Amino acid sequence: KYRTMVRKNFILPDGSHREFVTKEPEGSSSQAVLAITSDNKVVLAKQFRPGPEKIMYEIPGGGREPGETSEQAAVRELREETGYNAGRVEWLGTIHKDAYTNSIHQYYIAYDCTKSSDGQRLDSTEFIEAVEVSIDELFQLAKSASMTDTEVLFLAYDKLLSLKEG
């Protein structure tokens, strides 16, 4: 239900034919938001992940629902997964995760995020703890292989450094 494998056939530069297996539906996307509170803490989703078989820290995100823009999906996912509302939202960029993934990953940064009085709205298979970390802690989590979506740090690097300094 959550993963799709796609077989693709290509003619290589030497004229040979080769089949490649890629993942995720062609043209699909996911959205995520780097959420920053007014005191420059970063809101992360902490949860068990089956691939690495350990607790990981993640940028809140997920897929779009029908009729949603990428930004609306990112803000909704932040709200559902962490119970935080986004303040001002800015586009960061698009990433191709790897050479065998058909989907793109779109990232945003949201400033002045605040806790909602309603709390999280998790799916039945989600067991997420919303945590706030400093920008230094965020970089340390990425360096220690305790975090997914680390590419967002490159997209937001200058913005994060200016928040840390300012």
Image: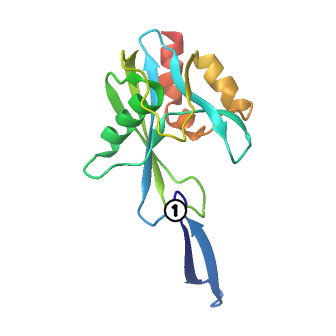
Front one among 109 and 122? 122
Q: For numbered disc 1, what is the local secondary structure?
A: loop
- Is 66 positioned to the left or the right of 17 in the image? left
The single residue placed furthest to the front in the displayed view is: 124
Q: Position of residue 159 (x, y in %)?
A: 47, 24
Mark 1 = which residue? 24
Left or right of residue 6, residue 83 in this image = left
Task: Inspect this view and state whether residue 91 appears.
Answer: no
Position of 69 relative to 56 (above/below): below
Tell me if I can see residue 165 in this picture.
Answer: yes
> Please, what is the three-letter code of the amino acid marked with disc 1?
Glu
Location of residue 4 in the rendering, given as x and y in whole percent from the top left corner: 53, 65
Quarter of the image holding residue 131?
top right
Q: What residue is drawn where x is 36% and y is 15%?
A: 117
Residue 42: give x, y in percent of width and height.
52, 20
Crowding at label 1, few (<14), some or many (≥20) Cα neighbours within 10 Å? some
* Residue depicted at x 58% and y 68%: 22
